[in-house]
Every structure is written in C-alpha cells, then in structure tokens.
Amino acid sequence: MKVIITENYDEMSKKAAEILIDVVKKNPNAVLGLATGSSPIGTYQNMIKDHEENGTSYKNVSSVNLDEYVGLTADHDQSYAYFMRTNLFDSIDIDQANTNLPCGAAADLQKECDRYNALLETKQQDVQVLGLGSNGHIGFNEPNTPFDSVTHIVDLTENTIKDNSRLFASIDEVPRQALSMGIKNIMQAKSIVMVVSGKNKAAAVKGMVKGEITPALPASVLQLHPCVTVICDKDAASLL
C-alpha cells in the first residue's frame, strides 16, 4: 500500500486525477470504477479540466459505480446516477450508455444485485476510486461486512444516515437502504486509488494502513491488495 500525504484537499484531488488520467491515456478502453460523495468531487473537477484543456478522451471508456440508494430513481437529485452526471459525465465525452450503476429503483433488488455482479464479471476495473468512511467503510460496506461479499442490499447504519443527511432537506428523507458493490468486487480491481481528507478520518486511516486486517474495519482489507494508492491530506494522515 502506497500512501501519499498532501498539504490539502486540492493537492490530493490533483494527484488522484493524474493517476486516473494516466490510466485512460495508456488504455483508451479502460474500465473506471467510480465513487460518489464529497471526497472525489475535486478529482472529477481536475479530470474535467484536463479534458477541456488537453483533450483527454473518454469516448471508449466505460465505468462502474460502487453504489446507489434504494428507492431513488436515476433522475432524483440525490441519486448517485444524478451525482455522476452532474459532477463528471456531462462534462466529458464518455458515452453514457457505457456508464453503469446499480438501479436503486429496481422492483426486485436481489435480482438487480445479481445483474450487477454479472456485469462486474465482464468489466474488471482498471482502477477503482474509493473514499473512506469515518468508521472505515468502503462503498456502503459497513463494519463487519464479510470480505467475500459481492453486490448486496445494505441497511444503512444510523451513523451513515446522519452523515448523509446534510445532503437532504431532512434526515427523514435519507434512504435507509442502498445497493453496494461488495468487498470482493472492489478487491478484483487491478488497482485502487483512495482519496481521504479531514481529521475525522484520521483514526480510520491509521487502522486501515497500520492496524489489524479485520471486517470490523472494512478498509483494512486493502492491505491485501497488490496495488493500492492512498492519497490523504495532512489532517487525514495526522495519526500515521
């Protein structure tokens, strides 16, 4: 596991974008595993800037996203499908037919999980972007999720619901479930880039990098992956 410590969020975002852009330049048909939330927004902004200024093309790239809320349609402004369009896809030349997320509005959620797992078997991520929850979760894989898990229905913890409530009009509007890639799906990526910022993540970063490998801290499994780059600002790295 390679750890890069940056001065701030902006520098972290630039370094992460450089890695993703390099993947695409080396392989125009790359599969990008993407994440949502506040952590990767700056990374995506740097990718858009590079696309506009340097012409890096995504026309043959495909993508797979980590997760989606249950009960939100793709056009809901808090869905992760909407997030990806507004924060990245609409501003680069990717064919949106080649972008993939679990469908949280599916009538049969288990069938949708099975569909997504089958898709992931055909689209190994060249690089998977991850954020890190303050409790060490990756995707919506909360503590004590089995390491051999694949795409599944998640009952969100009160902590995660509270963390995400800032994005909704009220906490009552936050979905109580999500569909998430499992840890096994994440670990199948050829390489992983994690972006982490803020002192509230420092304990999770320390446990992930230096602690015991345990389902109690899902991100600790990344110690077993052969190609992981963790890019964190000084605050997130303050306990290392």
Image (cartoon, rainbow, N blue to C red):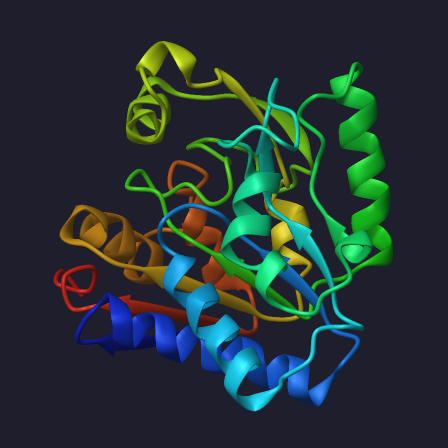
Of the 4 image quadrants, the one containing the C terminus is bottom left
x and y, in percent, of residue 83 in the image: 52, 44
Compared with 167, 110 (above or below) is above
Q: Against 186, is 68 above or below?
A: above
Residue furthest to the top? 172
Q: Residue 90 sits in which quadrant?
A: bottom right
User: Image quarter for residue 33?
Assistant: bottom right
Relative depth, front residue between 195 and 96: 96
As drawn, is 169 to the left or to the right of 141? left
Residue 201 coordinates in the image, percent (x, y): 23, 49
Asked if residue 212 lies left or right of residue 109, the reply is: left
Is 175 drawn above or below residue 142 in the view shown?
above
The residue at the point 35 percent across, 43 percent down is 133
Q: Residue at x 45, y 32 (%)?
A: 142
Instruction: Say which quadrant the N terminus sits in.
Output: bottom left
The answer to whether residue 85 of the structure is visible from this angle is yes
Image coordinates for residue 181, horizontal then vertical, percent: 64, 41
Viewer-proximal residue, 133 or 55?
A: 55
The residue lying at 63 percent from left, 81 percent from top is 23
Q: Quadrant of residue 238?
A: bottom left
| Residue under the point 31% across and 15% down | 170
